[in-house]
């Protein structure tokens, strides 16, 4: 009888240790997941709009690249993306398709365009000051670009992508070039969401 009691107690202790070990492993797994998520978020933290284009353009191979220019009329940059003056509302509309009513939503912008023909590829990146206005900005941008009077040929496709809660990227141009750009943006920024993808071809 005494032996049975000792055996029963031993079994209970072994089961208790196994349960404790399982709990510790579970806690460790949860800590690893939390650390991985935090690392991922830190890895895609964005400092400004220009950084988005510099990051994405750096992923292009030599066979994928084309002649580009960036920035606005007064601050143009050759062969690289450039900062865009958000107070120049007329240029925002004329070059990137941002309507004057939506310019008030942003405090930072950058651009990159095909040097030979803007309708082949034009892209803008924007920081929306209040995340509550991100969708309204996307809607205004889409409507304005869709209703443009195009010269020098029609672009094929328009995409508008949100990145996190405060950044928006738009691009219009040749369908194949836009598809490559979209693939690279979403690969570099896993939290990116394609808000609109529209045909502009007539």
Image (cartoon, rainbow, N blue to C red):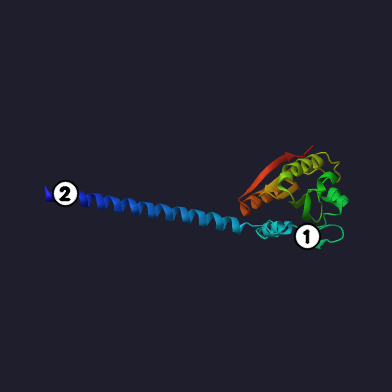
Circle nearer the N terminus (1, 2): 2
Q: Quadrant of the C terminus?
A: top right
Is 107 left, or right, of 165 in this rendering?
right
Q: Residue furthest left?
A: 1
Q: Report the number of discs.
A: 2
Q: Residue at x 61, y 52 (%)?
A: 187
Q: Residue furthest top?
A: 202
Q: Nearer the viewer, residue 95 or 193?
A: 193
Is 141 left, or right, of 188 in this rendering?
right
For disc 2, the neighbor class at 10 Å (few under 14, some 14 to 19, many from 20) is: few
Is 187 left, or right, of 9 in this rendering?
right
Residue pointed to by mark 2: 5
**Place of residue 19 in the rendered image (x, y in percent of width and height, measured from the top left):** 33, 50
**Place of residue 73 in the rendered image (x, y in percent of width and height, measured from the top left):** 86, 58
Task: Determine the image quadrant of residue 201.
Answer: top right
For disc 1, the neighbor class at 10 Å (few under 14, some 14 to 19, many from 20) is: many
Q: What element carries label 1?
A: strand
In the rendering, which numbered label is found on residue 82?
1
Does the rendering let one see residue 24? yes
**Place of residue 173 in the rendered image (x, y in percent of width and height, measured from the top left):** 76, 47
Frontmost of labels 1 and 2 is 2
**Place of residue 192 in the rendered image (x, y in percent of width and height, measured from the top left):** 64, 48
Q: Is mark 2 on a helix, strand or loop?
A: helix
In the rendering, which numbered label is found on residue 49?
none
Report if the CB atoms under discs 1 and 2 are less than 8 Å apart: no
Q: Distance between the residues labelled 1 and 2?
A: 79 Å
Is 16 left, or right, of 198 in this rendering?
left
Does the rendering let one see residue 70? no
């Amino acid at each position: 009888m005494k032996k049975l009691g000792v055996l029963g107690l031993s079994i209970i202790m072994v089961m208790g240790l196994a349960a404790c070990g399982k709990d510790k492993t579970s806690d460790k797994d949860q800590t690893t997941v939390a650390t991985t998520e935090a690392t991922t978020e830190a890895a895609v933290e964005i400092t400004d709009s220009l950084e988005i284009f510099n990051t994405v353009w750096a992923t292009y191979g030599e066979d994928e690249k084309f002649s580009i220019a960036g920035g606005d009329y007064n601050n143009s940059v050759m062969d690289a993306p450039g900062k865009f003056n958000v107070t120049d509302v007329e240029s925002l509309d004329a070059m990137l398709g941002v309507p004057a009513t939506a310019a008030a939503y942003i405090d930072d912008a950058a651009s990159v365009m095909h040097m030979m023909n803007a309708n082949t590829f034009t892209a803008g990146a924007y920081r929306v000051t209040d995340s509550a206005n991100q969708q309204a900005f996307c809607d205004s941008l889409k409507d304005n670009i869709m209703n443009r009077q195009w010269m020098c040929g029609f672009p094929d496709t328009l995409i508008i992508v949100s990145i996190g809660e405060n950044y928006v990227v738009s691009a219009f141009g040749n369908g194949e070039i836009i598809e490559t750009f979209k693939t690279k943006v979403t690969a570099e920024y896993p939290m990116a969401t394609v808000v609109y993808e529209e045909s502009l071809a007539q």
